[in-house]
Amino acid sequence: MADTLKILVAQLNPIVGDIDGNLEKARATLKEGAEKGADLVVFAEMFMLGYPPEDLVLKPSAVEDSMNAVRQLAEESADLPAFVTGSPWAEDGALYNSAVYCAGGVIEARYDKQELPNYGVFDEQRLFTKGKSPAVIINLKGVKIGLAICEDVWFDRVPNAARAAGAEMLIIPNGSPWRRSIHKERAEAFDRWSRLGMPYLFVNQVGGQDELVFDGASYATNTTHAERCGLVGQFVSGTEMVEFDLEERKFVLKDEGCRLDHDGWHMEYRAAMLALGDYVNKNKFPGVVLGMSGGIDSALTAAIAVDALGPDRVWCVMLPSKYTSSDSLEDAKACAKALGARYDIINIRPGVDALDEMLTEQFAETQSDTTEENIQSRLRAVTLMALSNKFGHMVVTTGNKSEMAVGYATLYGDMCGGYNALKDFYKTEVFELSRWRNLNHPDCALGPKGEVIPERIITKPPSAELREDQKDEDSLPPYDQLDDILRGLVDEEEDIRDIMARGHEEATVKRIEHLLYLAEYKRRQAPPGVKVGSKNFGRDRRYPITNRFRDD
């Protein structure tokens, strides 16, 4: 058998700021690499401090601690495999996003990221200095290896420079967040330099970090992205050995079982699961509590929470008022029972009556309107927050992207909580994802198989049930129309004339645009939620709150 260079890919889930914990993960992985005969272990971008560190890298002590952890790991690993790990690196008054190569107990080389992304969720030009050299080559077992970091390979300058410097292989530590279009985007970007014929290893982190979720999806390939050989998988932590044939000068790729998992609802559901689960676990909450209304948003949120955390860590609470229908009571209970989650009923009517009495004098001679509706929503939030304060469970909110877009949500009411699993899913997508979950059991899910969202929840007309016979379509266009308009306004930044050309009435489009801009102050105060689409409310989209622009 031909001699090979053995590389252990470490697709791990670091925690931002947990330098000691990340260091311990690296130690364990290096020992595993030694046991398996690895020559090199590769960790992800910024692994030692965690990615994205945001303004944490502006704190000198955090950067110094991360650098010292790398130095310490290098010293401890003199008799272990060589390794590449990511860390911020401060030198001569500049701060770099670096990949550090360590071997034989010392730091032998460092590559500083060249292409600093400054769009969408990224803000690296504000934080880091561009590296001075586009090519850093390390030599291991006679193989010349070029280093690059994430965004560097979305353009061809760094790969070209590495190849020109003699690189026979490219190793790319990544902190590349997932979104539903990511595999197509990576393929199109990386194939721009596939003409170089340079084998490369894509090593990505996995896990949820606030609004972002990382899919891992690490792979090796000898030519193009289309011929990639998936190593660990998507949305799972682990390691995988890949070998580089020293005679053929290419990776030895498996014939079978190395394709990445498919895209679609399966990946979107797993992304939502992992993001919520990591947010809860990394912030050390014992579990979650949510308002279970009998509607589709709370049902799907409960399903995601149970699949992420297990039934014993999810507490569903029905908070009925005088407007809550018997169907909603039955559906909420049936859904919680199907999921195996704890279910309680706390009637808010006494609280509503008490507030009505308190405000009798001030509200005299006025008509009931959204004020009374919002009181109900806010009383539910007060109740859930009381349970959270008393027992430690984090409140999960249940609003979807359509509602967040047009402000069809109550500030300090149903928007009150620590995390929103559906924040970047439009209402039509909530329906599709719910149907998908009833027919499928996601990989790594801790919840039960089978129908967990009763069919009536999916088929009945959506309603906030804050007044008699209320329906969402009393205030909003049908969701298929609304979501098409919102995708144009939010995701595509389309001119309203382009949206109208798809058959939407001018008055409707202008009204939705007005509601979208008007609700910006609400979204600024909304809890974080996982990014799944091209542009989420939060890091991606930063519109002014005070804003008189309207597209005429």
Image (cartoon, rainbow, N blue to C red):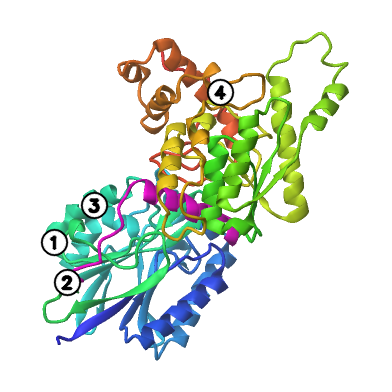
Label 1 and label 4: CA atoms lie apart by: 50 Å
Question: Earlier along the polypeptide chain: callout 4 or callout 3?
Answer: 3
Q: Which residues are magenta?
A: 254-282
Is residue 58 something that shows in the picture?
no
Mark 4, residues whose alpha carbon is within 10 Å: few (<14), some, or many (≥20)? some
The dot on residue 186 is none
Q: Nearer the viewer, mark 1 or mark 2?
A: 1
Please, what secondary structure does the residue beneath circle 2 have? loop
Please name the residue that numbered disc 2 is placed on. 166
**Residue beneath disc 4:** 518
Return the residue at label 1.
Answer: 196
User: Does the stretch in magenta take in 33?
Assistant: no
Inspect the image, locate mark 1, and give the three-letter code of the amino acid beneath it: Leu
For marks 1 and 2, give the CA distance: 11 Å
Q: Amino acid at mark 2?
A: Gly
* Residues at marks 4 and 2, CA–CA distance in whole angstroms: 56 Å
- Amino acid at dot 3: Ala
Specify few, some or many for label 2: CA neighbours under 10 Å numbering under 14, 14-19, or 20 or more: some
- In the picture, the disc for residue 187 is 3
Residue drawn at 44 percent across, 64 percent down: 46
In this rendering, the answer to whether 57 lies above or below 20 is above
Query: Measured along the vertical axis of the image, is residue 49 above or below residue 442?
Result: below
Q: Main secondary structure of the magenta part?
A: helix
Which one is closest to the eye, mark 4 or mark 2? 4
Looking at the image, residue 459 sits to the left or right of residue 380; the answer is left
Q: CA distance from mark 2 to mark 3?
A: 24 Å
Q: Earlier in the sequence, mark 1 or mark 2?
A: 2
The percent position of residue 386, horizontal first and vertical second, equals 77, 46
Element type where label 1 sits in the image: helix
Residue 225 pos. (x, y %) = 21, 57
